[in-house]
Amino acid sequence: MTTKGTPGRMVRIDDETWADYGKLCEEEGTSRGDDLRRHARKRVNAWRRKKAAETADLIGRMKTDSD
């Protein structure tokens, strides 16, 4: 159960990788959850920017075609 009102997610990661990931995050002063959320947010934001640029490009080309 989560404590901040967001849904919990399940991922499957082997025990050795999960343990070492925990050590890595601890050394970096973060938690696995925070690190995963930052990674996902960064990727999604990049994807959104790409989609917005593609849409703007398409709209620009449509305006040019109609002129």
Image (cartoon, rainbow, N blue to C red):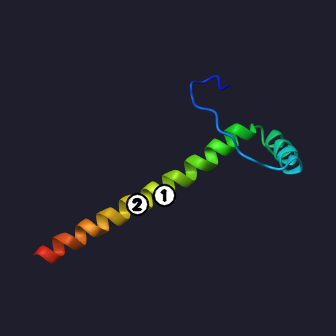
Q: Secondary structure at mark 1?
A: helix
The residue at the point 83 percent across, 42 percent down is 22
The residue that mark 2 highlights is 51
The amino acid beneath tag 2 is Lys
Q: Residues within 10 Å of mark 2 (few under 14, many from 20)?
A: few
On residue 33, which mark appears?
A: none
The amino acid beneath tag 1 is Trp
Image quarter of the C terminus:
bottom left
Image quarter of the N terminus:
top right
The residue that mark 1 highlights is 47
Total residue callouts: 2
Give above or below for 61 relative to 48.
below
- Contact (CB < 8 A) between labels 2 and 1? yes
Q: Residues within 10 Å of mark 1 (few under 14, many from 20)?
A: few
Where is residue 14 shown, x and y percent of the image?
84, 50
Left or right of residue 29, residue 48 in this image: left
The residue at the point 17 percent across, 70 percent down is 63
Where is residue 16 shown, x and y percent of the image?
89, 49
Q: Secondary structure at mark 2?
A: helix
- Residue 56: quadrant of the picture: bottom left
The residue at the point 48 percent across, 58 percent down is 47
Where is residue 42 shown, x and y percent of the image?
56, 51
The alpha-carbon separation of the residues under discs 2 and 1 comes to 6 Å
Left or right of residue 8, residue 60 in this image: left
The residue at the point 16 percent across, 77 percent down is 65
